[in-house]
Amino acid sequence: MSHLMPEPLVTWTWRLERVRNGRTVLTRSQASTARNDLMSDRAAHPETYVGYEDELATALDELEVLSRQANRHDDLLSVMAAERRRAEREATASGTVLDPRAASRGRTSLAAEHDRVPGGLPEPLDQWVHRLIRYRAGVKIITPIEAARAEIRLRNEADLQPGAYRSGVAAGYYHRAIRELGEIATAERPGRRDGAGVTRGLSGRVA
């Protein structure tokens, strides 16, 4: 049965993204504790990690690197190195050749896009804005069921806190996130969803 990514893994995946783009810092102690917590949670609830083995392996790899670093500058460089090794493993597995120059340009571009996201967005929205940036760049997988549940959660949050989600700078990020999550959620269905939320069949008629 499909399910959402386990909450501890969601939290640390998100925080590691923020470390990569310089928005937060993890001490060696925090990284070590986080790694132990993730391993303990996976051992206690293995069924919830089914389908998220790659995300878990990436988080554990990066936290291991961070737990051995002395300062923020080294943290960022080491996480980027861990990300590069993961990309190289994926390229080898798929039989493609990774261009180091293209990978470097991609990381720089991705970091710049992360940096353009303003601070102060509601936390669930901020988390999905950054995940969608990685998804668009092809370095993050978001399943249709995960996207559908995220869309519902963000809509519910916006209904509870309209001032935080539907006004000011946050409004643009909210509407884009909802649109993209909706597109991902319906990507594997035979019909498509138009701007009014109506599902249409392949012929274009209302289903």
Image: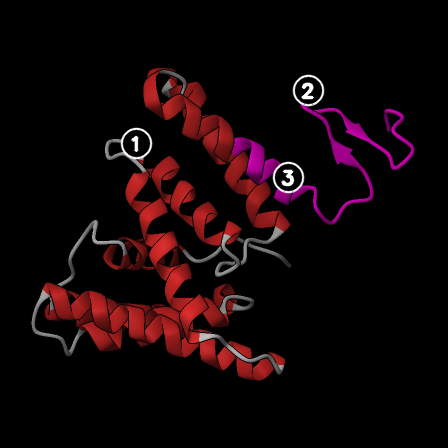
Q: Residue 97: say if magenta.
A: no
Quarter of the view holding residue 196: top right
Question: The disc labelled 3 sits on which kind of residue?
Answer: Glu
Q: Residue at x 63, y 49 (%)?
A: 144
Q: Residue at x 56, y 55 (%)?
A: 3
Left or right side of 176 for 65: left
Which secondary structure, mark 2? loop
Q: Quadrant of the N terminus?
A: bottom right
Question: The disc labelled 1 sits on which kind of residue?
Answer: Leu
> In the image, which disc is placed on residue 183?
3
- Residue beneath disc 2: 196
Contact check, label 1 and label 3, Cβ < 8 Å: no
Q: Residue at x 24, y 35 (%)?
A: 119
Circle 2 residues within 10 Å: few <14, some 14–19, many ≥20: few
Circle 3 residues within 10 Å: few <14, some 14–19, many ≥20: some
Contact check, label 2 and label 3, Cβ < 8 Å: no
Quarter of the view holding residue 92: bottom right
- Residue beneath disc 1: 121
Specify the principal SS of the magenta part: loop
Left or right side of 62 for 23: left
Question: The disc labelled 2 sits on which kind of residue?
Answer: Ala
Near-viewer residue (182 or 43): 182
Residue range highlighted in magenta: 178-207
